[in-house]
Image (cartoon, helix red, strand yellow):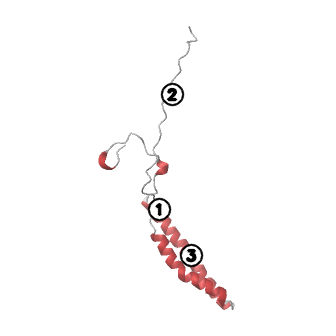
Amino acid sequence: MAHAGGVTRAEPVLITTAPPSPAQERDARERRYLITMGIRLVCFILAIVLFSLGMPFFGGFAVAGSLILPWVAVVAANAGPTRNPAAAPSLYAARKAAELEAGHDPRA
């Protein structure tokens, strides 16, 4: 198996340690953004309802949420993958081949 620089590795890399693909990371960021903006929409509608019911104190919290959540959504969506640059991928530890023990021959 070759990696950067054309050097061949004897040990295979475990696939379970591979990072998500860029498409998967983008999809996860889009999902976080849409969920956060959905919550913002709920806060906005809730603010309208609470103010119309004469509850300005609770409506103020809903307005604050609807004003803060777009910023949170953008920051969360633009956050890159969190990878530890010092961590190397795990390598498959090959087991030593089993050997038969010396013993007596039952046919003898």
Q: Report the mark closest to the observer, 3 or 2.
A: 2
Q: CA distance from mark 3 to mark 2?
A: 58 Å
Q: In the image as oriented, which residue stretches furthest toward the left?
A: 5
Q: Judging from the image, what secondary structure is the residue with disc 3 in?
A: helix
Seen at 58% across and 76% down, the residue is: 39
Instruction: Check disc 3 and report the residue beneath it.
Output: 38
Seen at 48% across and 51% down, the residue is: 17
Task: Name the foreground residue: 49 vs 98.
Answer: 98
Q: CA distance from mark 1 to mark 3?
A: 24 Å
User: In the image, is residue 95 above or below residue 85?
Assistant: above
Q: CA distance from mark 2 to mark 1?
A: 40 Å
Q: Judging from the image, what secondary structure is the residue with disc 1 in?
A: loop
* First in residue order: circle 2 vs circle 1: 1
Q: x, y percentage for residue 98?
A: 51, 28
Q: Judging from the image, what secondary structure is the residue with disc 2 in?
A: loop
Q: x, y percentage for residue 85?
A: 42, 57
Seen at 54% across and 83% down, the residue is: 67
Q: x, y percentage for residue 66?
A: 56, 82
Q: In the rendered structure, which amino acid carries the disc numbered 1?
A: Thr
* First in residue order: circle 3 vs circle 2: 3
Crowding at mark 1 (Cα within 10 Å: few <14, some 14-19, many 20+): few
Q: In the rendered structure, which amino acid carries the disc numbered 3?
A: Gly
Crowding at mark 3 (Cα within 10 Å: few <14, some 14-19, many 20+): few
In which quadrant is the N terminus drawn?
top left
Q: In the image as oriented, which residue stretches furthest toward the top?
A: 108
* First in residue order: circle 1 vs circle 3: 3
Instruction: Check disc 1 and report the residue beneath it.
Output: 82
* Disc number placed over residue 14 in the picture, else none: none
Instruction: Check disc 2 and report the residue beneath it.
Output: 98
Q: In the rendered structure, which amino acid carries the disc numbered 2?
A: Ala
